Image: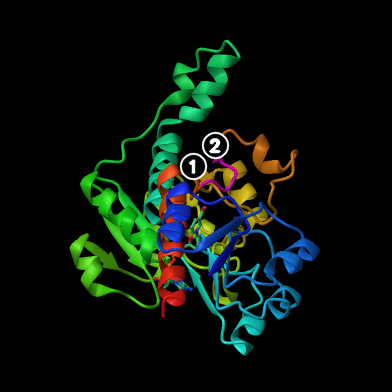
Amino acid sequence: MKVLVAAPLHEKAIEVLKNAGFEVLYEEYPDEGRLIELAEDVDAIVVRSKPKVTRKVIEAAPNLKVIGRAGVGLDNIDLEAAKEREIRVVNSPAASSRSVAELVLAMMFNVARKVSFADRKMREGVWAKKQCMGIELDGKTLGIVGFGRIGYQIAKIAKALGMKVLLYDPYPNEERAKEVEGNFVDLETLLEESDVVTLHVPLVEQTYHLINEERLKLMKNTAILINAARGAVVDTNALVKALREGWIAGAGLDVYEEEPLPKDHPLTKLDNVVLTPHIGASTVEAQMRAGVQVAEQIVEVLKG
Ligand code: NAD
């Protein structure tokens, strides 16, 4: 059997495929025309967020039985076309949960202690000690919006930090909440009572601009907002206003309504926000896990 790996994949994942006796063909990010050529006689295709596995690619691959996406989203795969041919689509949604949680933690500490701001000032030759008064996280309240895989990982760490955990999720998992000593409340209460609010919901119609002007105004003016979910969960214009006018104290953002974030975006002019370029899943461990989990599922499907 032949597996086409069409995006960089961890060597351990390639090993899993080879150990199962498959022939592995590797070509990084082929365009649609080339992918159609390559797909002609393969049993499986592995991609990441690129390349696109379009209907044309699927139709050009008579032996194709499984498409693997090393990572979370499936937007680059024509799921309808795959379903029509009964081609399985597998991914690894849990592979990066811990990595995202640790980035969120890094952002919480960074904003609370103004680490990025202090570093910028040091490089300008400014000893900004007076402007760098921070807060401790111990004893503070963390509000987690969306208590799924990532939210749960963060709650576990927050508990160890001595934080009180508030949770909001329309589908509450009470057992897990008990484990982290978290309490489910409504969104408004969570926003009003939390010192740090972190977002971990999927981007769907109900969560588009979930955090808008009205909800930002409910937050404490000392609070920190972290968004490592999807950019459009927050109304960016409202957030810029909130950060500029001090409705909240600071923010940490890994995701944006427009990615890459435009160079002169108003967010880049604010000192009380820490910005990272969508690196939640960018760790050696997450990439390895994502690859291996997908490779293992491909082996399962192809070996029946
Ligand atoms: P998950 O599906 O495990 O958890 C999402 C949770 O949100 C679920 O418990 C669900 O019930 C809840 N939810 C759904 N609608 C909601 C609503 N309207 N209000 C509140 N909660 C709601 O997902 P996850 O793996 O924890 O991922 C969470 C988010 O993180 C996703 O948006 C994902 O795209 C994003 N993500 C970002 C990165 C990154 O690099 N920054 C990496 C991985 C995932």
**Is residue 265 placed above or below 4 in the rendered structure?**
above
**Decide: marks 1, 2 in contact (CB < 8 A)?**
yes
Q: Nearer the viewer, residue 172 or 164?
A: 172
The x, y position of residue 157, in whole percent, is 28, 49
Three-letter code, disc 1? Ala
To which quarter of the image does residue 153 belong? Answer: bottom left
Three-letter code, disc 2? Asn
Q: Nearer the viewer, residue 206 or 156?
A: 156
Residue 172 lies left or right of residue 212; in this view the side is left
Residue at screen point 72% across, 80% down: 59
Residue 32 lies left or right of residue 138; in this view the side is right
Q: Nearer the viewer, residue 53 or 232?
A: 53
Q: Measure the C-alpha gap from mark 1 to mark 2.
A: 7 Å
Q: Is label 2 in a helix, a strand or a loop?
A: loop
Q: Residue furthest top?
A: 125
Q: Mark 1 near ligand 1 (CB under 8 Å)?
A: no
The x, y position of residue 201, in whole percent, is 47, 66
Which mark sits nearer the N-terminus, 1 or 2?
1
Can you identify the residue that label 2 sits on? 272
Residue at screen point 41% across, 62% down: 293
Span shown in magenta: 272-279
Circle nearer the viewer, 1 or 2: 2
To which quarter of the image does residue 264 belong? Answer: top right
Can you identify the residue that label 1 sits on? 249
Q: Is label 1 in a helix, a strand or a loop?
A: loop
Membership of 278 in magenta stretch: yes
The x, y position of residue 30, in whole percent, is 72, 57
Residue at screen point 70% across, 42% down: 266
* Quarter of the image that includes the C terminus: bottom left
